[in-house]
Image (cartoon, coloured by chain):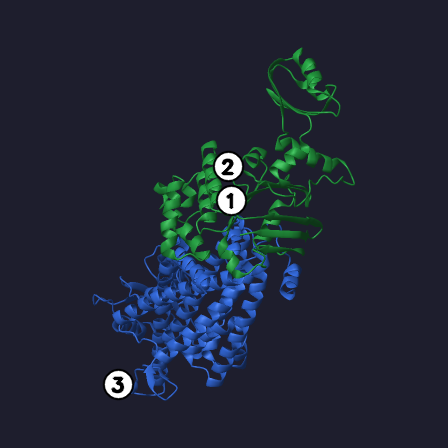
Amino acid sequence: MKKILAVAKWEYLQKLRSKAFLVSLFLMPVIIVAFGVLPTIFATTEDKDTKVIGVIDQTGVVARPLASRMESLYRLSNGQPNYLVHIIAGSSDMDFQQAIASATDQVVRNEMEGYCIIRDNIMSDSVVEYRSRNVGDFRLLTRLEGSLRNVLQERRLIQRGLDSRLLSELRVPMDLRTIKIGKSGETEEAGFATVWFTAYIFLMMLLFMVQTSGQLLVRSFIEEKSNRIVEVLVSSCSPTNLMAGKVLGLSALGLTQLGFWGLIGIAVSAQYGLHGIAPEQAALQFVYFILGYLLYAALFIAAGSPLTTEQEAQQVTSYLVLILIIPLVIALPAMQNPNAAWIKVLTFIPLLTAPMMAVRIPIQIPSATELVLTIALMLASIYAAMWVAGRVFRVAILATGKRLSIGEMLRLVRAD
Amino acid sequence: MTLRISNLRKDFSNVRAVDGVSFEVTPGEILGLLGPNGAGKTTTIRIILNILQADAGEVTYDGRPFSEEIRNTVGYLPEERGLYRKYRLLETIVYFAELRGMAAGAAVTEALRWLERFSLLEYKNSRLEELSKGNQQKVQVIISIIHDPQLIVLDEPFTGLDPVNQILLKDVLLELRRNKKAIIFSTHQMEQAEKLSDTICLINKGRVILSGSLRDVKRQHGRNTVRLEFTGDASFLHTLAGVRKALVYQNTAELDLSDGATPQQVLAQVLSRVELRRFELVEPSLQSIFLEAVGARVEETPPPPLTVAAGSEKAP
């Protein structure tokens, strides 16, 4: 036990000071912010200048109400209108073609953001064309679409004889708020973004932890093997103790990482007055984290100890980490329907349990039966994986030169 | 500690690396494990240290089989040198000492003492990669002896050390012998083996072909051996009448005379052809014994029993 602790202490302290670890420690929060928060911030950033939108209106009745709506409703932060609608005459066919040509010209010369074409049959088919160099301005498109719909609806209602003053009285502004109902019925305000972001953060943390510590572990194997330090190690303490010490040290490293990120998370959410996640959620996440981490550690030992070069190590670690990407991909459908059978099935695959739970727990805490079963399954898998890893490790760590084939490794595992 | 190995055998996929090797080392004894490259020295050493398991045979430590406690009483310098390149000297030494069961505090004290002894104290906080090869090797020697082991196994400890450090290491080993440690060292350098060993064990192709106390081995081979020092071209010595075998170097030569030939006959022939500075009757060098034993082994099949009373009495 003393030797296990000596190995654990050494692995922990040396890796704590390694560049790879420090980089991941600080890089991870930066990346989370970069990928998770920045796009939202950019997407919600207000325009700085008024944008000019052209309208070519064959009907002659849509352009004006559209213009007044767009110009009055949306304002820049300095009080100026966000959009200026430039009505381009184009009633006759001849004029129409000319109008399009000149509007296009203005767009090309950056004098105009884009322009809409409203044709004669708009009232029947409701098709409007918007032409612009940038068709990805999500906010502008939403606003334009909303305004057009509004104007057209109004037109139709007025055609049916409704009073326009009555109309404005009847119009209902809509603001949909989502309230998440917890297990025992308590409610909290949680939008799609919050849930998605929480799940995403947990997944990324798991990914980063496994990636960093897996790489550190495999790299240390390779150094110890190529330098034959391992001979001294294995003559000083048994391979089993050596492996146990490494796993222990590495887990301590993972916990340090997790603790550090946790503190950052708490600090950030306190700063912005965000909801922290509920304690029971945090506790569950923590349990699955540790279990997932240990399982991957065993895999890294089994897959990493036979390796002899850095390149091989890179490949193996990336393949293993790739497994963790799967839940990232299916996170969205999982959120739409957390109770789908296939989601549950995936959760019961030990390699995916931890990342799947990272996604599922923020959405809806799975049933107690499911929790107990997955945890039991994880414990069993960890035990089995460590057992196999120990066998491979004992022999592979000493082998140099020729890499062991899969067949040879299987034989090692079976042989006593 | 008395280490006894008997009839050790180890096979790798299609090679028998160690084939019936036996020897014994007692406290206060230095055993030189000799043999050409690939003879099975390192495999034998790894089995002694429980890094590899023998396919057959037995290793006992003070009469008992290997146990976890044994790990704390053996020291090992592997042949292929290497340490954690990025880590600091003192920390590394202390880590390995702790792995051998030392308490951290005692490990630091001892590490500093040995660093001073090996003139490495100024580097105690340097990274290992900043040290020269020779200095790294000295660090490894420290790691192999810091925990006061009773059995010390050094695989090629002298290669890579400059003459000053070779003398330093030799002094340390002799001191350890005085303190009743059992020491095994393997080497290709016969001069070192000759200076240090009490007993030798010469292995070739996995088999012991010569073993016993250095004195016995030499006496056994001490036929007519003549050592010369001269100036001039001495290549004729190889074909000289009455010379069974000649080792000719730039200015010196060692001649093994045929049965019946006398040193006088040889002297007479040599005098006329080179400028002789020295001519003496000597015990054969370990080098020539080594070459003869290994050479004979290579040429003849089946090999003749060259073993000098395996397990013979050690020098008193």
- The hue of chain A in the figure is blue
Using the rendered image of the protein, determine whether residue A17 is visible from the camera's viewpoint. no
Badge 1 vs badge 3, beta-carbon distance below 8 Å: no
Question: Residue, x 72% and y 19% (percent of image)?
Answer: B240
Question: Residue, x 45% and y 51% (percent of image)?
Answer: B148
Return the residue at label 3: A165
Question: Residue, x 69% and y 36% (percent of image)?
Answer: B293
Badge 2 vs badge 1, beta-carbon distance below 8 Å: yes
Q: Amino acid at mark 1?
A: Arg
Q: Amino acid at mark 2?
A: Gly
Q: Position of residue A121 (x, y in %)?
A: 43, 75
The quadrant of the rendering that contains the C terminus of chain A is bottom right
Badge 3 vs badge 2, beta-carbon distance below 8 Å: no
Question: Residue, x 47% and y 34% (percent of image)?
Answer: B167
Return the residue at label 2: B160
Using the rendered image of the protein, determine whether residue A382 is visible from the camera's viewpoint. yes
On residue B81, the disc is 1
Q: Position of residue A216 (x, y in %)?
A: 46, 57
Q: CA distance from mark 2 to mark 1?
A: 10 Å
Q: Nearer the viewer, mark 3 or mark 2?
A: 2
Considering only vertical position in the picture, is B70 above or below A41?
Answer: above
Same chain letter for marks 2 and 1: yes
Considering only vertical position in the picture, is B246 above or below A284?
Answer: above
Considering only vertical position in the picture, is A407 above or below B142?
Answer: below
Same chain letter for marks 3 and 2: no
The chain under label 2 reads B
Q: Seen from this angle, which residue lies furthest left? A: A78
The chain under label 3 reads A
Q: Secondary structure at mark 1?
A: loop
Q: Earlier in the sequence, mark 2 or mark 1?
A: 1
